[in-house]
């Protein structure tokens, strides 16, 4: 992969995939900046609620020009349609979709830069009890396709990475909420062609590839990084 | 030093793939109908649709190398004819070259591949949108993707990854042929500007960079996938 340069903002930069992006960006020659509700001690961190326009706008103005933006910040809510509260639905949509829209709206991405959104294999399949999450990740793909055209005249490329299962605290929290979480986790590895779940660094590598000059003709597309999860039945 | 076998290396995209992999430190074996010119590479001229010739080429490669790290299948041809005028021999030739050769090379390569090795097959946006008067090309390129994910399942437990790259228009031999047939070549560049969000067709090196990344350890959790290198053509369609 060709090296990175300049500042690159990572929303959700203190979480599992986000923190892996921070490490990968630095290793590739860029300067990571984290936007999250908590600090990432590895890099410059701004504490924000990504769903709040005033906070995002102020943070992006403070950071000024960036060569890239990676939107990772996301949340989940467990609940079937009939049990899912309107407030929980709105919170998932606010963080997962509005948060990415706001980050793109206010980030000062230089001409020729790159943007990567985090979608999910959840945009392609359905699991009972995660209505809001599935819907939000489908929306992320729509957002990516729509905005790739808006940014193209400035040579800014917009793409999405869709992870399958990733070994993160986010995954652990989701499983802990399930009565049979341990059993679900035990079956996760064999749901992938590669026979294991991803490490966060493997998702980060795909994201920074898409930001890099190696991907200079790639825009408006989704890169699924799922170890063959969607291909296996 | 990692080792890669590349088919179609005498062509536009295949040649760029060979140069890109060589620059990244790969040792190369290049397979094509005519010998590919690449300093330091072993170049083998053969008919990639002849099972014996392909097997022989891989025996020759296996005598030099103890393993193969990457197989990049690029070789492809085109044939213009609507279905109602398509000769069966032309149809068969398209199938044999564009997707059959990938079956033959993979069949011979996988026994020399292990954990971390990767196969990358050249697909096309033509597997997703119908180019008028090129039904055979459209069919073979969709088949390349199906073959890719079927094979990814078969070799996944050995840690071998299989992916495809789907370019939009590429400034290479295929386009040169179209340019030579066009009454006004500028029309083709104007159409390319219109067709792609990024306002131009790809350079072959941009397609090669995607293949290089998919073959690298950086793509360690990517398998059974198609990576579009199309400047936003599919999104615009």
Image (cartoon, coloured by chain):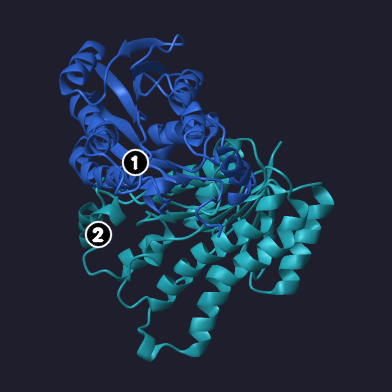
Chain colours: A blue, B cyan
Q: Which residue is pictured at 56% across the width and 65% down the height?
A: B147
In the rendered image, which residue does mark 2 sit on?
Answer: B237
What kind of element bears circle 2? loop
Residue A1 shows up from this direction: no
Say if B213 sits above or below B6 in the image. Answer: above
Say if A196 sits above or below B120 in the image. Answer: above
List x then y, in percent, for residue A127. Answer: 43, 51
Q: Which residue is pictured at 44% across the width and 37% down the height?
A: A214
From the viewer's side, name the closer residue of B99 and B9: B99
List x then y, in percent, for residue A166. Answer: 52, 36
What kind of element bears circle 1? strand
Say if B181 sits above or below B205 in the image. Answer: below
Describe residue B67's horizontal placement relative to residue B95 as left or right: right
Residue B16 shows up from this direction: yes
Q: Which residue is pictured at 68% across the width and 47% down the height?
A: B159
**Mark 2 and mark 1, same subunit?**
no
In the rendered image, which residue does mark 1 sit on?
Answer: A159
């Amino acid at each position: 992969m060709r090296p990175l340069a300049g500042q690159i903002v990572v929303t959700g930069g203190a979480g599992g995939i986000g923190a892996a992006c921070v490490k990968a960006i630095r290793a590739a020659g860029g300067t990571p900046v984290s936007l999250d509700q908590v600090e990432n001690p590895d890099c410059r961190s701004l504490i924000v609620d990504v769903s709040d326009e005033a906070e995002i706008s102020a943070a992006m103005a403070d950071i000024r020009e960036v060569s890239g933006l990676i939107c990772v910040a996301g949340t989940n809510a467990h609940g079937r349609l009939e049990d899912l509260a309107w407030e929980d639905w709105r919170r998932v949509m606010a963080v997962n979709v509005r948060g990415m829209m706001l980050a793109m709206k206010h980030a000062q991405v230089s001409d020729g830069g790159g943007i990567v959104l985090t979608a999910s294999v959840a945009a392609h399949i359905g699991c009972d009890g995660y209505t809001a999450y599935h819907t939000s990740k489908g929306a992320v793909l729509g957002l990516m396709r729509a905005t790739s055209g808006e940014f193209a005249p400035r040579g800014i490329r917009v793409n999405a990475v869709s992870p399958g299962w990733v070994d993160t605290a986010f995954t652990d929290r989701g499983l802990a909420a399930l009565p049979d979480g341990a059993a679900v986790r035990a079956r996760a590895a064999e749901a992938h062609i590669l026979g294991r779940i991803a490490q966060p660094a493997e998702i980060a590598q795909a994201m920074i590839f898409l930001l890099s000059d190696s991907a200079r003709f790639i825009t408006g597309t989704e890169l699924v990084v799922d170890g063959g999860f969607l291909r296996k039945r | 030093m990692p080792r890669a076998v590349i088919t179609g290396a005498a062509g536009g995209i295949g040649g760029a793939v060979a140069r890109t992999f060589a620059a990244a430190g790969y040792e190369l074996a290049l397979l094509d109908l005519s010998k590919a010119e690449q300093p330091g590479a072993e170049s083998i001229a053969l008919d990639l649709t002849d099972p014996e010739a392909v097997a022989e080429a891989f025996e020759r490669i296996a005598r030099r190398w103890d393993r193969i790290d990457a197989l990049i299948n690029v070789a492809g041809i085109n044939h213009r004819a609507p279905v109602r005028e398509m000769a069966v021999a032309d149809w068969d030739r398209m199938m044999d070259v564009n997707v059959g050769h990938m079956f033959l090379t993979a069949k011979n390569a996988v026994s020399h591949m292990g954990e971390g090795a990767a196969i990358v097959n050249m697909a096309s946006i033509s597997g997703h949108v119908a180019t008028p008067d090129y039904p055979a090309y459209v069919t073979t390129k969709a088949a390349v993707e199906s073959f890719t994910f079927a094979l990814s399942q078969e070799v996944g437990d050995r840690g071998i990854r299989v992916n495809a790259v789907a370019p939009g228009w590429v400034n290479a031999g295929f386009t040169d042929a179209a340019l030579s047939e066009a009454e006004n070549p500028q029309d083709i560049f104007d159409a390319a500007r219109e067709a792609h969000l990024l306002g131009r067709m790809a350079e072959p090196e941009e397609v090669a960079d995607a293949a290089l990344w998919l073959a690298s350890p950086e793509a360690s959790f990517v398998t059974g996938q198609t990576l579009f290198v199309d400047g936003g053509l599919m999104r615009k369609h």
